[in-house]
Amino acid sequence: MATVIKMINPNTKIAKDGLYGFSWTSFFFSGIPAITRGDIGLGLGVLVATIIFTLFSFGLLYFVVNIIFAFVYNKNYTQRLIERGFVFAEDGANADRARQSLGMVS
């Protein structure tokens, strides 16, 4: 299940929620959560892939595409926030779990 970690960009003072763990919203709604978070290209790409794979497999590959996306999207989103200069706005166990989940050295 996805866990939220508060993040802030020290330069712009913009705060966002980083996420890590399985994304149930991405599993059920495909690329729509990515689009709402501003990842329009990725979200549309996953939606198109989901539609194509669903049509050619009579719906069977819908779950395969969305399961893969649900496992990787939150980590990918949070890593891109870090690349854009965001840092964790909280310390403690949640930040430690986020670093471990994201593959960051503590």
Image (tube, rainbow, N blue to C red):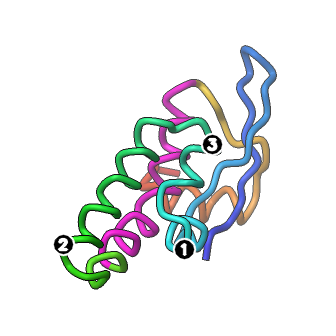
1 or 2: tag closer to the N-terminus:
1
Mark 3 or 2: the one toward you: 2
Instruction: Determine which residue is flagged by label 1.
Output: 28
The answer to which quarter of the image holds residue 86 is top right
Mark 3 or 1: the one toward you: 1
Compared across the picture, whether 8 is left or right of 1 comes to right
Say which amino acid is labelled 3: Arg
Is the magenta region chiefly helix, strand or loop? helix
Mark 1–mark 2 CB contact (< 8 Å): no
3 or 2: tag closer to the N-terminus:
3
Instruction: Determine which residue is flagged by label 2.
Output: 56
Q: Residue at x 54, y 48 (%)?
A: 34
Q: Against 50, is 80 above or below?
A: above
Q: Against 12, is 92 above or below?
A: below
Q: What is the distance, in whole Å, between disc 3 and disc 2 at their CAs?
A: 29 Å
The answer to which quarter of the image holds residue 81 is top right
Mark 2 surroundings: few (<14), some (14-19) or many (≥20) residues within 10 A: few
Q: What is the distance, in whole Å, between disc 3 and disc 1 at their CAs?
A: 16 Å
